[in-house]
C-alpha cells in the first residue's frame, strides 16, 4: 500500500505533528511505501519533503523552505514549473497527521472533500464535534454516553463555579495538555484562567477527581467491523503536562494491555462504538475514558492521536491498510441544468 503523509499546520500543536510524521515514517519503513511527505507550514504553504530530510533539525532550522513548493488541486497536489502545473504522482490516500488547527478542526477535511482527495482522518462533522470540548460534551449526552459535569467560561466573564475546588481548566479548542491547569483555590484559579485564555476565548471547567482511573482505547470501523487497540492505562501523576506526554512521544513499541476485567473492556468497546458510529468513518480515533465507582465516563475524543496511537496496536500497518480500503465514498452529483432549461423554454428565452 502507498500512503502520503501530511503534517505541520498552523496550530499550537504544529511541532507535535512533525514528531508524529517522523515516527510514522519510521514505523512503516519497509512495510508500506510512503510515496510523499507533504509539510504544511504556519503560513499555509505546502512543501514536498524528501524522506532523508525527515528529522527534527531540518524543520527547526527552517531548511524546509528550500524544498519544492506544492499546490493543492483537484485530485491531489501539484508542482509548478516552466511548462505549467504538473500533478505529483503519489498515492491516492493521504494520511492526515496534523493535530489541532487545520487537521482536527475540519479545515483540511473540507478542503480534501472539495478537491476529491482520499484521506485517512476525521471528516468535517467529526472534526467539528471532537475539536471543541463543549460540543464533545453535548454529543456524548445526545448519544447516551456519560461525561463529567462542566461549566463554560468565555473571556471577560466573571467565574461563577458550580463545583468546589479542586477543578481543572482547559481551553475549549486545544489538545496536548496545552493551557491545562488544576486549581485548588481562587488564587490558582486566576493563574489557570490566564493560562487557558492565552490559547482560547472560551474555556471548559470540570471538577478534578484525584486518583481517577484513566484508560485509552483506539480503534476504527472497517465497513461493518470494528478493530480495537489494547486498552492502555497511562501510568501518570495527577495531570500529564505537555512534557510528560511528548518528551517520550515518539515511542513505536507496543504497550501492555491494562489489567482490567473482560466485562469492563467489553463495556468500554461498546461505548467506543456508540461514539464512533457513522460520524468518525474514515478515521482512526482514540477515546480517553475515566472509570469512577465502576462507571465509565468519556473524557475526550482524539480524532488524530499522536503518532496515530500506533503503539496501542499489535499490527498497526495492517490497521492502516484496512482503513485505507474502507474509506467513506462520496456521491457524485451530476448537474445537467434541466431545471434552468425548462425555465428558459417557458419564458421563450
Image (spheres, rainbow, N blue to C red):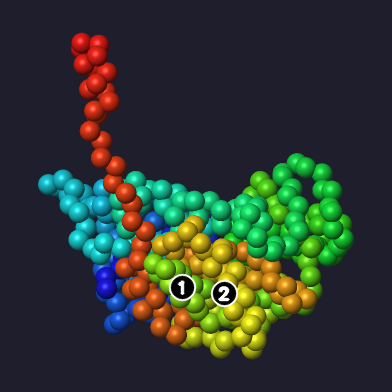
Residue of label 2: 269
Residue 61 appears in view: no
Q: Residue at x 57, y 74 (%)?
A: 269
The answer to which quarter of the image holds residue 52 is bottom left
Mark 2 is surrounded, within 10 Å at the Cα level, by few (under 14), some (14 to 19) or many (20 or more) other residues, namely many
Q: Secondary structure at mark 2?
A: helix
In the picture, measured across the screen, residue 58 lies left or right of residue 33, that is right
Relative image position of residue 155 (x, y in whole percent): 72, 44
Mark 1 is surrounded, within 10 Å at the Cα level, by few (under 14), some (14 to 19) or many (20 or more) other residues, namely few
Residue 304 appears in view: yes
Q: Residue at x 28, y 46 (%)?
A: 332
Q: Which mark is residue 226?
A: 1
Q: Residue furthest left?
A: 83
Q: Is residue 322 above or below residue 163?
A: below
Of the image marks 2 and 1, the number of the one nearer the N terminus:
1
The answer to which quarter of the image holds residue 265 is bottom right
In the picture, measured across the screen, residue 213 lies left or right of residue 255, that is right
Q: Are marks 2 and 1 in contact (CB under 8 Å)?
A: yes
Q: Residue at x 23, y 33 (%)?
A: 336
Check the picture and name the quadrant holding the N terminus: bottom left
As rendered, which of 219 and 343 lies closer to the eye? Answer: 343
As rendered, which of 184 and 258 lies closer to the eye? Answer: 258
Check the picture and name the quadrant holding the C terminus: top left
Amino acid at each position: 500500500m502507498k500512503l502520503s503523509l501530511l503534517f505541520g499546520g498552523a496550530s499550537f500543536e504544529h511541532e507535535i505533528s512533525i514528531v508524529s510524521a517522523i515516527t510514522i515514517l519510521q514505523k512503516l519503513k519497509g512495510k508500506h511505501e510512503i510515496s510523499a511527505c507533504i509539510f504544511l507550514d504556519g503560513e499555509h504553504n505546502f512543501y514536498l519533503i524528501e524522506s532523508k530530510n525527515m528529522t527534527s533539525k531540518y524543520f527547526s532550522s527552517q531548511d524546509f523552505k528550500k524544498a519544492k513548493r506544492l499546490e493543492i488541486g483537484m485530485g491531489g497536489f501539484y508542482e509548478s514549473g516552466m511548462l505549467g502545473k504538473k500533478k505529483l504522482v503519489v498515492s491516492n490516500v493521504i494520511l492526515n497527521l496534523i493535530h489541532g488547527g487545520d487537521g482536527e478542526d475540519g479545515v483540511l477535511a473540507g478542503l480534501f472533500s472539495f478537491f476529491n482527495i482520499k484521506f485517512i482522518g476525521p471528516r468535517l462533522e467529526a472534526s467539528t464535534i471532537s475539536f471543541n470540548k463543549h460540543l464533545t460534551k453535548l454529543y456524548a449526552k445526545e448519544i447516551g454516553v456519560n461525561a463529567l459535569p462542566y461549566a463554560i467560561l468565555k473571556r471577560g466573564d466573571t467565574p461563577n463555579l458550580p463545583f468546589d475546588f479542586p477543578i481543572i481548566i482547559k481551553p475549549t479548542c486545544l489538545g496536548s495538555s496545552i493551557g491545562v491547569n488544576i486549581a485548588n483555590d481562587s488564587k490558582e484559579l486566576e493563574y489557570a484562567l490566564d493560562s487557558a485564555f492565552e490559547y482560547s476565548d472560551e474555556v471548559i471547567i470540570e471538577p478534578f477527581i484525584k486518583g481517577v482511573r484513566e484508560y485509552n482505547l483506539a480503534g476504527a470501523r472497517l465497513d461493518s467491523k470494528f478493530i480495537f487497540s489494547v486498552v492502555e492505562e497511562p501510568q501518570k501523576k495527577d495531570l500529564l503536562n505537555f512534557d510528560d506526554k511528548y518528551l517520550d512521544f515518539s515511542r513505536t513499541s507496543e504497550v501492555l494491555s491494562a489489567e482490567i476485567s473482560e466485562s469492563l473492556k467489553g463495556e468500554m468497546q461498546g461505548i467506543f462504538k456508540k461514539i464512533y458510529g457513522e460520524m468518525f468513518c474514515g478515521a482512526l480515533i482514540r477515546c480517553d475514558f475515566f472509570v469512577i465507582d465502576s462507571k465509565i465516563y468519556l473524557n475526550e475524543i482524539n480524532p488524530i492521536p499522536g503518532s496515530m496511537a500506533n503503539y496501542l496496536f499489535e499490527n498497526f500497518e495492517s490497521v492502516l491498510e484496512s482503513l485505507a480500503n474502507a474509506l467513506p465514498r462520496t456521491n457524485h452529483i451530476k448537474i445537467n441544468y434541466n431545471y434552468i432549461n425548462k425555465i428558459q423554454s417557458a419564458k421563450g428565452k
